[in-house]
Each structure stands twice: as structure tokens, then as C-alpha cells.
Image (cartoon, rainbow, N blue to C red):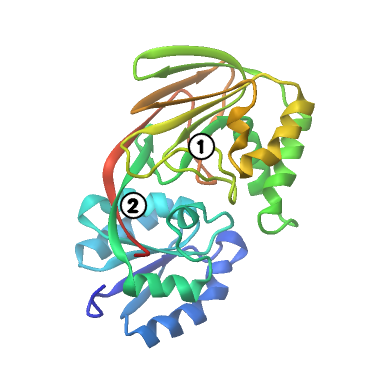
Amino acid sequence: MSADRRLALIMNPSAAGGRAVRLLPDVENELDSLGLGHRIVETRDIGHASELAREASDAGEVVVAMGGDGLVGTLAGAIGREGTLGVIPAGRGNDFARELSIPNDARAACGVLASGRVRELDLGEANGKPFACIASVGFDSEANRLANEARLIKGNLVYLYAALRALAAWRPVRFTVTLDGAEHSFEGYTVVAANSRFYGGGMRVAPDAKLTDGLLDVVFVGENSKLRFLANLPKVFSGKHVEQDGIETHRGREVEIRADRPFDVYADGDVLTELPATARVIPGAMRVIAPR
């Protein structure tokens, strides 16, 4: 990347327990050493982040998401194909960076901003709201809510804690899913609409998803005993869970999800919308600096 281009680092100071704030001195020192001009922009909320990103992009700056996956999707949706997005992982899961092999180490991630290439990648959207990695609903809604409410458990362990708590109180849901016009109905745990492979800090929930194929990988997690569900949880990290009974994988451009009781739809760790929801993929809608 040309050294004369400036970066606008957009960060939420309270995200991930203030991780971005703690990383900031090292990041600024590294960017200075690389000769990358930059400014720091603190955001109050998602709407504010979108506004800041559009202003920076219109001014010719590279917009850098210094936060978690939710911030990545928000900024990508705000700047569209006209802007360029960089990523310094500073969230809990950092699954978008994992997908692109952007280092989790902040200094090394700065190096990608200096030497990386711009890739055109697909962007997900649910009820008109953008997401970078994965939108899911059902059991995942409860687990995400509990993870976000947890204060004492740090790092990726929070996702395991939340899954166990959610499972204890879980009762099955009847989902109706329309995928590119074909209707499916099943009782079970979760529906996943995946733009990329990972969620929850490295869980390979959609092992064949690609950020460049113009499609969503849709995973149905059907009814099974809680004991069997618990036994299969570790397999999500390798992607082997999709080989188990009760799990179906599909692929399409647009998926409409309904359920027999209300749920929030979570994407990239945050509440995105609620049911009923229509998720789709927008091919090549984000331009992201990735490792060569």
C-alpha cells in the first residue's frame, strides 16, 4: 500500500473489555515506524461508526476496523465497493481476521496494512443490515446473549461457558427456511447463514464457506439429544460436526428464516436484527487489505 495514503483507525474503546485501548500505543508506534500516516477515531455506537467510516472513505482514507467482527461488517457495509477496509483484530473472536490469515498480533496486523493487497470479498446482509462472517439464530441467539452478558470470563472460553448455559435451558424450535425459493422445515437448534467459515473464536461452523463465491453456506442443526449435541460441540472447531446425523448443509444466494417463537438474529457476535429475517450475499461488496 502506498505510504502516502492515510489511515482512519475506527475503534470502540469499550469493546472486548477495552482491548483496543490497550493495544493502541503499540499500534501507533508500529504505524509510525512503517511510515503510515493515521488518525484515531473513537466511535460511540454502530450508527456513529458507519457515519465516521463514510466520512473517512469520502476523504480518501483507508478505513481500519480496530475492534471485533461486528465492527468489520458495519464499516464494510458503510463504505461499500468505493472504499478500502483494513483490519487490526481487537475483539474477542476475531474470526474475520482468522479467515483472511490477518495476524492476531496487532503489530503484525499493521504490517499487513503496509504490505498487503486489496481483495474483493462478498458481504452478507440480513434484513438490510451488513455482516462480514456469519449470521445465526436459535440456540446461537441464546448462547451469544449469554456470552455478551458474561463479565468474569475472558477470551474464547466465554463461548464455551455460554453454550453450556444455553443448552441447560434449551427447548427445540420449529424452523421454516426458504432457500432460493425452496422451503425447508425442521425442528432443532440453529440455522446458520455463513459468508465465511468461522464464528465464536475459531469454530469452523461452515467448513466449506468462501468469501469469494457469491453464495451463503446455510447450515441446519436439527433435533438431537442434549447429550449428543454436547458431544458434537468440540467437532465444530474442526468442521467435522457437519458429518453428524441431524446436520444439513445447503448453499444459496438468499435465505428467509422463520421460527415458531421470537429470536434475535446475531451476526459476528452482535444483535443484527430479529425474525423473520432474510439474509443474502452481495458479491464483491467489500475491498479488504489482506496478506499477500
Residue at (65% x, 35% y) in the render:
142
Name above or below for residue 185 compared with residue 227. Answer: above
Are the residues tagged 1 and 2 within 8 Å (C-beta)? no
Location of residue 281 in the rendering, given as x and y in whole percent from the top left corner: 33, 35
Left or right: where 234 falls relative to 265: right
Location of residue 261 in the rendering, given as x and y in whole percent from the top left corner: 59, 19
Name above or below for residue 75 compared with residue 103. Answer: above
Quadrant housing residue 130: top left
Name above or below for residue 75 compared with residue 211. Answer: below
Residue at (25% x, 80% y) in the render:
3
- N-terminal of the pair, mark 1 or mark 2, is 2
Task: Name the residue carrying label 1.
Answer: 206
Is residue 257 at least partly visible in the picture?
A: yes
Q: Nearer the viewer, mark 1 or mark 2?
A: 1
Location of residue 180 in the rendering, given as x and y in whole percent from the top left corner: 34, 19
**Structural distance between the alpha carbons of marks 1 and 2:** 21 Å
Left or right: where 8 falls relative to 235: left
Image quarter hosting the N terminus:
bottom left
**Dot 1: few (<14), some (14–19), or many (≥20) neighbours within 10 Å?**
many
Quadrant housing residue 172: top right
Residue at (40% x, 24% y) in the render:
255
Is residue 45 at least partly visible in the picture?
A: no
Q: Type of residue at label 2?
A: Ala
Location of residue 132 in the rendering, given as x and y in whole percent from the top left corner: 41, 46
Task: Name the residue carrying label 2.
Answer: 76
Q: Type of residue at label 1?
A: Ala
Q: Nearer the viewer, residue 46 or 9?
A: 9
Image quarter hosting the C terminus:
bottom left
Q: Secondary structure at mark 1?
A: loop
